[in-house]
Image (tube, rainbow, N blue to C red):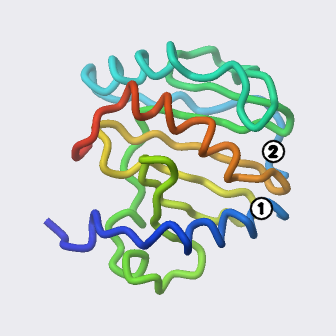
Amino acid sequence: MNSYRHRLLGLPALVLLITAAGCSSADDSGSAAVPSPDTKVTKLCRNLDKVLPAKVDDVSRDDPEPASALTAGWGSPAIILRCGVPRPPKMIDPKVAEGGDPDALAGGVNGVDWLMEKQDDGAYRFTTANRLAYVEVTVPKGRDTSGVLVDLAPAVKKAIPEGIAD
């Protein structure tokens, strides 16, 4: 096992990047690819879907197409959540754990560890770490990412137990 896999930088570095991300629109098409995890992860994702908030960052839930308990969305352009995604390659990249990747950073928000990756279109993708299922949240350019993660943390903590997903 790679010793960097679960090493996370402190919250201050993540908050700094989240603040920068808040000043930065992703595709507002309202569609999302549905993940295809195994049965155990699918059950966890269905449990997450049941406890997701009706509003995230003050925008109402409006799920993407195709309809699935593994995806959720809020607002337009949409904040998209996908549960049961594969582990992102950067999650085990030593440069990320050491703070040497300018487009990716590990950190935590309200008890949930996240890998943050800046996308080419200015959006940010966050993927949970140290949980039994990977939950990915894409926040469009221009939206304050900190509010999104704060609003989603209680549901993730309730439905997706801590542990190693792979």
Quick check: 49 above or below 93?
A: above
Of 122 and 34, nearer the camera is: 122
For residue 108, say whether it is visible: yes
Quick check: 32 above or below 67?
A: below
Task: Give the amino acid type for the residue marked by disc 2 in the picture.
Answer: Asp
Q: Residue at x 65, y 72 (%)?
A: 16
Task: Give the amino acid type for the residue marked by disc 1 in the picture.
Answer: Asp
**Gap between marks 2 and 1 measured at Cα:** 9 Å
- Residue 32 in picture, x, y percent from top left: 65, 32
Asked if the residue at tag 1 contacts the one at tag 2, i.e. Cβ–Cβ closer than 8 Å, the answer is yes
40 sits to left or right of 13: left
- Residue 95 in picture, x, y percent from top left: 40, 82
13 sits to left or right of 62: left
Of 9 and 27, nearer the camera is: 9
- Residue 73 in picture, x, y percent from top left: 69, 28
Q: Label 1: few (<14), some or many (≥20) within 10 Å?
A: few
- Residue 121 numbered mark, or none: 1
Q: Secondary structure at mark 2?
A: loop
Q: Residue at x 60, y 45 (%)?
A: 149
Of 70 and 144, nearer the camera is: 144
Q: Residue at x 26, y 73 (%)?
A: 4
Name the quarter where the C terminus is drawn.
Answer: top left
65 sits to left or right of 91: right
Of 87 and 58, nearer the camera is: 58
Nearer the N terminus, badge 2 or badge 1? 2
Name the quarter where the N terminus is drawn.
Answer: bottom left
- Residue 27 numbered mark, or none: 2
**In which quarter of the view is residue 131 placed?**
top left
The single residue placed furthest to the left in the displayed view is 1
Q: Secondary structure at mark 1?
A: loop
74 sits to left or right of 136: right
